[in-house]
Amino acid sequence: MLYTSTRDNAVRVTAAEAITRGISADGGLFVPVEIPQVDAAFLASLCEKSYVERAVSVLKLFLDEFGEDELRAYAEGAYLGGKYSSGATVPLVSPDARHNILELWHGPTCAFKDMALQMLPYLLTGSAKKIGNDKKIVILVATSGDTGKAALEGFRDVPGTGILVFYPADGVSPMQKLQMTTQEGKNVGVCAIRGNFDDAQTGVKKIFTDERVKQTLAERGFAFSSANSINWGRLAPQIVYYFSAYADMVNAGKVRLGEKIDVTVPTGNFGNILAAYYAKRMGMPVNKLICASNANNVLTDFINTGVYDRNRKFYTTISPSMDILISSNLERLLYMLSDGDDAYVRGLFARLSAEGKYDVGERVADLVRESFAAGFCSDEETKRTIGALFAADGYLCDTHTGVAVAVYDGYVKKTGDGTPNVIASTASPYKFSAAVLEAVSGKKNDDGDEFAAVDELTRVTGVEAPAQLKTLRGKTPRFRDICTQGEMEAQVYRMLDGLAD
Ligand SMILES: *Cc1c(COP(=O)(O)O)cnc(C)c1O
């Protein structure tokens, strides 16, 4: 299985190279040259398997340089060992007859990012070894909140690696911020950025593709890699849980083997929903992928019109991990839908960087709408939805999942589509306690004390907060630096000096 670049079809690299490099030198993203296909027997076999075995079965289709035993050891390290607070790694919960919620957030940092970022350190160190990389791998991350913590937790004290995280100073929840600034480990660094997530991501992308920076690093024995969802090593593990959800839907008698499901995903960078699209292209029976956005509805407009236009107001919402106007992974979708037309993709992204806007043309726009539906909702609607779901079913969800439920309900009302549906639930409600508390009780957490909101939410709902978050109470932040996008490069060098060997 070989990989190419969305911006240059002449590129051919192995999975190990794609994962180690993170992003192609031409600025494109690595994609598999061919999409592996599965059949009904494959789906039936998954129904009998544990999550670890499902992961091995799906991942080996994309990562054939890795032996099955190797992948099994990785999956056991990533998904077992008491790291997941639930019985199942990713439970599928049905609070009522219409909603099937795939809880992806029972891992160490209480967001779905753990599903990929517990696996990535194994894939990355394994890949580096396979291609004979002798440099220390520095993971550089721009985060809208959850990636940063999940990457820090995944890579902390992993030999041969260091990890540096940039987050938008005013763009993450208090709990997300506390999770990152109190991070332990000898090989970690964390810094706030003045600006929003897009500023942080643009800054990181610039540093990544700058030959001069690369050289400076190489001289000091370091090589960058990425833990953002542009890295194939992050996307591949996310494909697994959609297959797992399908198998669980079959096992629960909600669909017959081969019958289609809809999948609703609260979307930001388009990584999670793209993984679902890969599952569909591989042959998992999917009708529609429903892309749910908050007030930053650039993807809703894109899916409905074929025009991607980031020139719009940026909103800070109660679902901060989706406060994004540049969805990087869309590039992979457009490459696939244009049948691998690298010149077309180059053209689109040149326009995006020059004008902040591109039009994919009628043919691709039609193909987008064939597979995807889209909707968005306001913070008020999200809160109403969380409140209503809790009142009716006693089921508590976070603000991102709330967006997905609201958009899915609106989609069903509008289209009458009765296809059984799976909603990707991306975070624990306790990562966004103040907003969730307001949603279920109408009470505002006025004094700003995050743990007062946690306590009150527990009291009001009777739902326990995850132990991983409760232990942060009273911890003193270890990282307090803040810088501008222009200062990021210097900050990287400063943080590298601080990493222990
Ligand atoms: C990252 C994140 C999202 C968005 O996922 P993408 O893969 O960027 O589309 C949604 N919800 C939560 C809680 C997240 O952490």
Image (cartoon, rainbow, N blue to C red):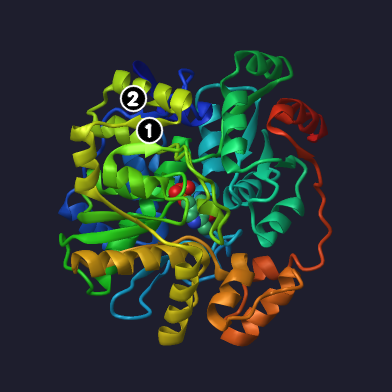
Q: Say whether residue 304 is left or right of residue 392.
A: left
Query: What is the x, y in percent for residue 369?
Result: 22, 46
Q: Say whether residue 337 is left or right of residue 264.
A: left
Of callouts 1 and 2, the N-terminal one: 1
- At 50% from the left and 27% from the top, the residue drawn is 130
Badge 2 local density, few (<14 within 10 Å), some, or many (20+)?
A: many
Which kind of residue does numbered mark 2 sit on?
Answer: Val
Q: Is residue 35 visible?
A: yes
Q: How many marks?
A: 2
* Quarter containing the N terminus: top left
Q: Nearer the viewer, residue 246 or 164?
A: 164
* Cα gap from disc 1 to disc 2, whole angstroms: 7 Å
| Image position of 354 with respect to 317: above or below | above
- At 29% from the left and 27% from the top, the residue drawn is 33
Q: Secondary structure at mark 2?
A: helix
Residue 247: quarter of image? bottom left
Q: Is residue 88 visible?
A: no
Badge 1 local density, few (<14 within 10 Å), some, or many (20+)?
A: many
Q: Are marks 1 and 2 in contact (CB under 8 Å)?
A: yes
Kindly tell me whether mark 2's CB lies below 8 Å from ligand 1: no
Query: What is the x, y in percent for residue 422?
Result: 32, 64
Q: Secondary structure at mark 1?
A: helix
Kindly tell me whether mark 1's CB lies below 8 Å from ligand 1: no
Which kind of residue does numbered mark 1 sit on?
Answer: Glu
Please give the residue where the numbered disc 1 appears in the rendered image.
Answer: 331
| Image position of 51 with respect to 58: above or below | below
Query: What is the x, y in percent for residue 165?
Result: 67, 41
| Image position of 471 with respect to 270: above or below | below
- Disc assigned to residue 208: none
Please give the residue where the numbered disc 2 appears in the rendered image.
Answer: 345
- At 18% from the left and 60% from the top, the residue drawn is 260
* Quarter containing the C terminus: top right
